[in-house]
Amino acid sequence: MSDVISGLHSVTVHIRDPLRARTFYRDVLRLKELMFDEKTGRIVFALPDSTTLLSMHVMRPEEGGREPGTVSGVVFRHPDPEAAVAEISRRGGTITVPPTKFETSVGTFVRAVFADPDGNEFLLSNRTD
């Protein structure tokens, strides 16, 4: 059986306010901005050490998908989630779940959750497998 997925190109998040989102992702998370189109409200960021893009835009009325503020389940990686969320908080970000240690059958890892200005939540974990 052949693979039907060969990689991940991008993750798209719907937002309400492009300028607030741009400030958060650029200045709080310090992601590299690749494109900003004020007219369409579209922003694209590069994820560190990855070819995957994080893009966002204002949701059009006829467009399907998740409403702004309802994204969850996207997991970012950092070797020290506790230090990372402390820095996100210091820069003005919102931590919705503090760092928590999890025991699994493959080992112990730490994860935390932060939110963007629209309330979209992202996990941060030191898990590598």
Image (cartoon, grey):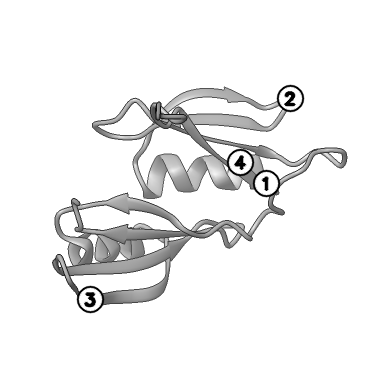
Return the residue at label 2: 39
Q: Of the residues shown, which amino acid type is indicated by label 3?
A: Phe
Mark 3 / mark 4, whichever is N-terminal: 4
Crowd class of label 2 (few under 14; some 14 to 19; many from 20; radius 10 Å):
few
Q: Is residue 66 above or below residue 5?
A: below
Mark 2 / mark 4, whichever is N-terminal: 4
Q: Of the residues shown, which amino acid type is indicated by label 2?
A: Lys
Q: Of the residues shown, which amino acid type is indicated by label 4?
A: Leu
Residue 27 lies, in percent from the top left, at: 40, 44
Residues marked 3 and 2 touching at CB (< 8 Å): no
Helix, strand or loop under label 3? strand
Nearer-the-camera pick, 59 or 117: 59
Relative placement, left or right, of 63 versus 65 is right
Q: Quadrant of residue 18?
A: top right
Return the residue at label 1: 17
Return the residue at label 3: 102
Relative placement, left or right, of 124 versus 35 is left
Residue 79 lies, in percent from the top left, at: 15, 54
Name the residue: 28% across, 67% down: 111
Name the residue: 45% across, 44% down: 25
**Alpha carbons under labels 2 and 1: distance apart:** 12 Å
Return the residue at label 4: 19
Mark 3 / mark 2, whichever is N-terminal: 2
Crowd class of label 4 (few under 14; some 14 to 19; many from 20; radius 10 Å):
few
Name the residue: 32% across, 68% down: 112
**Alpha carbons under labels 3 and 4: distance apart:** 36 Å
Helix, strand or loop under label 1? loop
